[in-house]
Image (cartoon, rainbow, N blue to C red):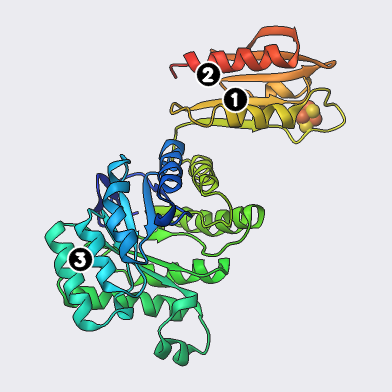
């Protein structure tokens, strides 16, 4: 991951910095109090860079007020109206997302000039649904090559204006096309602009999680990408939770509670899935890394969960809690009911120092 480092507010994107987590508010500025609530919820959940749509002057006017409520960088999403980009930069945007090719030569000059004055980056966000007509005509459909060419063309517009604080995204709702487009672009990414990766319009919670995990996961394993966004038709807090879990599972993050749970089988005599889900929910906000195992039986459970810091397993319908110790595990609670086991683990997590 030899990308150039581009700073979005206080968050460095690229270089050797950790892959950052992004999300986007789904509530418009016209419902300002609700928007603030959602933005704070996302920050609390672990979102590190937050984006909001700025489609009109009312939104641009309220942008600064929203920013004051947050401690994370706030990005303005602009589509065609360069005046909204100018207003959002004046209102303190930490980055704008815009496609230079969409807004006209003279207008983009003004946007670049202001972005330079304020020292903020621009994300070029190419989507299969908004490809330039000439590129679409050349390739007949939004092929990966077409998406990568569009991104390159937009990058060149900014480079000609001597602007290099660029982050690039190239998204399709098709996982393979998305992955291929990023790979093609990255092969020719000589300036090593950091890439914001994700699969767009990926769908509802279940299918969207799968599509994003497949696409983002494949790219990150290739060493491609510096910042990620799960795009889901679901409450945006789900995007943040999923992004955190993916980064942890790829060994790119080492924070928060990681729940390991067995798939259950005929030996199971306790509520594995209910207990695992409840622990995951209750420990969603913890910052330190802690691995908790929830295993269905005492035959295989402790052995399979040897890497966990604490675990619970079933024995004839009762709950047994065990803890990691030098050279193995030791039982710390026996013949417990579900509630006592849960309380023991939550208490342990609260005091856990790592
Ligand atoms: S840990 Fe026990 S209950 Fe869970 S899947 Fe393995 S054998 Fe079955």
Q: Nearer the viewer, residue 126 or 316?
A: 126
Quote the CA–CA distance across marks 1 and 3.
44 Å
Q: Nearer the viewer, residue 18 or 121?
A: 121
Quote the CA–CA distance across marks 2 and 3.
44 Å
Estimate the x, y position of residue 310 in percent, counting from the top left.
59, 19
Determine the image quadrant of residue 207. Answer: bottom right
Nearer to us: label 2 or label 1: 2
Is residue 233 among the parts visible in the rendering?
yes
> Which residue in the protein does label 3 denote?
164
Whichever of labels 2 and 1 marks the residue nearer the N terminus, that label is 1
Residue at the location (57% across, 69% down)? Answer: 174
Q: How many marks?
A: 3
Q: Above or below — where is 69 with respect to 8?
A: above
Q: Above or below — where is 59 with respect to 307?
A: below
Q: Which quadrant does the C terminus fall into? A: top left
The secondary structure type at the circle numbered 3 is loop
Q: Above or below — where is 351 with respect to 225?
A: above
Q: Which quadrant does the N terminus fall into? A: bottom left
Ligand 1 position by quadrant: top right
The reply, left or right, for residue 12 in relation to residue 269 is: left
**Disc number at residue 292?**
1
The answer to whether the beta carbon of the residue marked 3 is less than 8 Å from any atom of ligand 1 is: no
In the displayed orientation, state which residue is furthest to the left: 117
The reply, left or right, for residue 317 in relation to residue 155 is: right
**Disc number at residue 19?**
none
| Circles 2 and 1: CB atoms closer than 8 Å | yes
> Which residue in the protein does label 2 denote?
349
């Amino acid at each position: 991951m030899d990308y150039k480092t581009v700073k979005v507010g206080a968050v460095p994107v690229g270089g050797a910095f950790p892959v950052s987590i992004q999300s986007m508010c789904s509530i418009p500025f016209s419902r300002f109090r609700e928007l603030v609530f959602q933005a704070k919820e996302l920050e609390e959940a672990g979102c590190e860079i937050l984006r909001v749509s700025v489609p009109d002057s009312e939104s641009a006017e309220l942008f600064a007020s929203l920013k004051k409520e947050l401690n994370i960088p706030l990005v303005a999403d602009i589509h065609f109206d360069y005046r909204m980009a100018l207003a959002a930069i004046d209102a303190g945007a930490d980055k704008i997302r815009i496609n230079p090719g969409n807004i006209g030569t003279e207008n983009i000059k003004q946007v670049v000039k202001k972005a330079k004055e304020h020292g903020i980056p621009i994300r070029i966000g190419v989507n299969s649904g908004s490809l330039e007509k000439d590129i679409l005509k050349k390739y007949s459909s939004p092929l990966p090559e077409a998406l990568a060419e569009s991104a390159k063309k937009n990058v060149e517009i900014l480079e000609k204006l001597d602007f290099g604080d660029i982050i690039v995204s190239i998204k399709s709702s098709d996982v393979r096309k998305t992955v291929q487009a990023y790979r093609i672009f990255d092969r020719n990414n000589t300036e090593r602009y950091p890439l914001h990766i994700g699969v767009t319009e990926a769908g509802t919670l279940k299918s969207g999680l799968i599509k994003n995990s497949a696409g983002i996961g494949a790219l990150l394993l290739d060493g491609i990408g510096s910042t990620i966004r799960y795009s889901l038709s679901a409450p945006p807090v789900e995007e943040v939770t999923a992004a955190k879990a993916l980064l942890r599972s790829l060994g790119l993050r080492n924070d928060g509670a990681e729940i390991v749970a067995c798939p259950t089988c005929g030996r199971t005599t306790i509520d594995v899935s209910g207990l695992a889900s409840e622990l995951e929910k209750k420990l969603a906000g913890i910052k330190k890394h802690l691995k908790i195992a929830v295993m269905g039986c005492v035959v295989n459970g402790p052995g399979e969960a040897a890497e966990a810091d604490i675990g619970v397993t079933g024995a004839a319908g009762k709950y047994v809690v065990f803890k990691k110790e030098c050279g193995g595990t030791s039982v710390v609670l026996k013949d417990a009911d579900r509630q006592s086991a849960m309380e023991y683990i939550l208490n342990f997590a609260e005091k856990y120092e790592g």
